[in-house]
Image: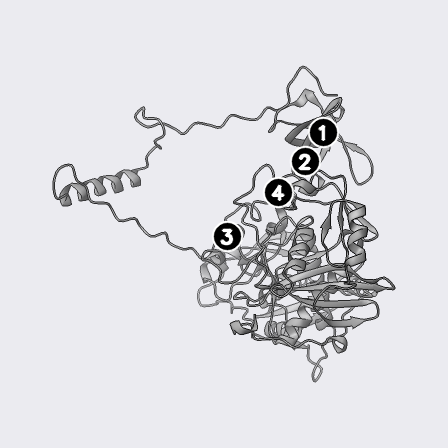
Amino acid sequence: MADTLVELVEGCRLPVLRKNQENEDEWPLAEILSVKEVPGKKLYYVHYIDFNKRLDEWVTPDRLDMKKLQFPKKEAKTPTKNGLPGSRPSSPDRDVRKSLDLNLQSASAPSRGKTLPTPKRKAESVSLTSQGSAAPSVPSLPSSAEAPQASVFPAVVRESFSNKSREEHEQLTVANGTTRRLVPSQPGRKRKNCGTDEMIKVFQYNSPRSASAFLPPGEDSQDSLDGIPSAPRMTGSLVSDRSHDDIVTRMKNIDCIELGRHRLKPWYFSPYPQELTTLPILYLCEFCLKYLKSLKCLQRHLTKCNLRHPPGNEIYRKGTISFFEIDGRKNKTYSQNLCLLAKCFLDHKTLYYDTDPFLFYVMTEYDSKGFHIVGYFSKEKESTEDYNVACILTLPPYQRRGYGKLLIEFSYELSKVEGKTGTPEKPLSDLGLLSYRSYWSQTILEILMDLKSDNGERPQITINEISEITSVKKEDVISTLQYLNLINYYKGQYILTLSEDIVDGHERAMQKRHLRIDPKCLHFTPKDWSKRGKW
């Protein structure tokens, strides 16, 4: 119970009562982000530390444990040097550079009282792919609950790496469940790189512990952990750099959205007009996604709205499932409304009102009233980094029903038609990472289990061949094989060992996967967007 004698301010931390998934009481530590007064009491907007932001909520004072209250720490003042406020403590390197600059200025000054400006050093651009795991978490994640995404996601093999790092990494190996130290490799006996064109033998029904060796550590498949590009992109990107985060965007601003027959509780902030954020319910037309302030306004709008499906071309239909391709330039209003809705459930992406560089693929479910939106993904018309997805979302009422994997599968079917390999734009959300990892695993295992041996020998396949068959980028193929612990080094070559547990688990998963894309039902002609006239 909150003590009314203590004034709670923004930034305070204390345990807050909430229900967990088993409907049991728990008291996780939370931070107060905002305070507001309603008739008769105060409400506190709290963010649970180490929990996802979508669990943030307004709480009443009786749910606060004041006994363990932590007041916000005061910001430390900048250390002083020589008693002068605001100056930083110097380092030997900085002192030497400063003295050199002073000597240079005094030597080259034309007269007393005048100084020549010293040329500024150009900032060196650092390739993000070489930064590895320099940052502690995915671009300023809202909570550390999502932070392990980058660390648990398996590293991608570098195509070339030093022998020294390889030997250091091979000091430990796992055999029969125990860790033991290996004898350092002898000079002259260097292991061969696992190139993507190298043939890899596939062993089925063997224990993966029979012979194992670690692949060298490489770049994380999350591309960059701070999400900020080293150079300006020529095309649009929906990755949020989190540089403009403030207390407003950290808080949900919409209480409830009514979309057709569903009422949705938003997870995150979305920049809908300010006057609509105070309404108890925000009404959306489920066909054109226009936002309205009241049910009466919605009913009046529906009498005038002629749409019964998303604008654009229907490029796929099988049963009740359809996909529509929408050009962000030709259907700007619909695309902006779709981004506003999606931002309620995507925290890692930012919202661009300039939707011209993007295509939107909306998945719908058909009934007698029309085509109802289930989810969507967007992609750049021109991607310099082989991205085939910018944002991807299944609306909450349709989650955990196989629609997410269907969206992912459709994005790769488009890549197959385009003759390209693709990968989703990073960083992925926690749910997005799980969906992609599951899709990659099932797709690759499907390929491996269908391989047939030649002349009684073990079947062989290369990483490049897997990538070409599936249109999954090579880095994602390698990271998935590592995540599944399939790739091993045995008797001078790399092998893939499929244990009975992996095969049985894959077969059970595929029996539950009823929704699949039928390439015969896809009617899609890719365009060459490099010609600006196509825009």
Q: Which residue is mark 4?
A: 142
Spot occupied by residue 62 in the image (x, y as percentages of width and height): 76, 24
Q: Is residue 249 visible?
A: yes
Image vertical order of residue 200 relative to residue 435, above or below: below
| Mark closer to the chain start, 2 or 4 | 2
Classify mark 3: residues with Cα within 10 Å, few (<14), some (14-19) or many (20+): some
Separation of residues labelled 2 and 1 (CA atoms): 8 Å
Q: Earlier in the sequence, mark 2 or mark 1?
A: 1
Amino acid type, label 3: Ile
Of the image marks 2 and 3, the number of the one nearer the N terminus: 2
Local crowd at mark 2 within 10 Å, few (<14), some, or many (≥20)? many
Q: Quadrant of the C terminus?
A: bottom right
Write down the residue under mark 2.
48
Q: Amino acid at mark 1?
A: Val
Out of 517 and 332, give the one closest to the viewer: 332
Q: Which callout, 3 or 4, points at the residue further toward the start of the chain? A: 4
Amino acid tagged 2: Tyr
Residue 454, x across and y down, in percent: 69, 83
Q: How many marks?
A: 4
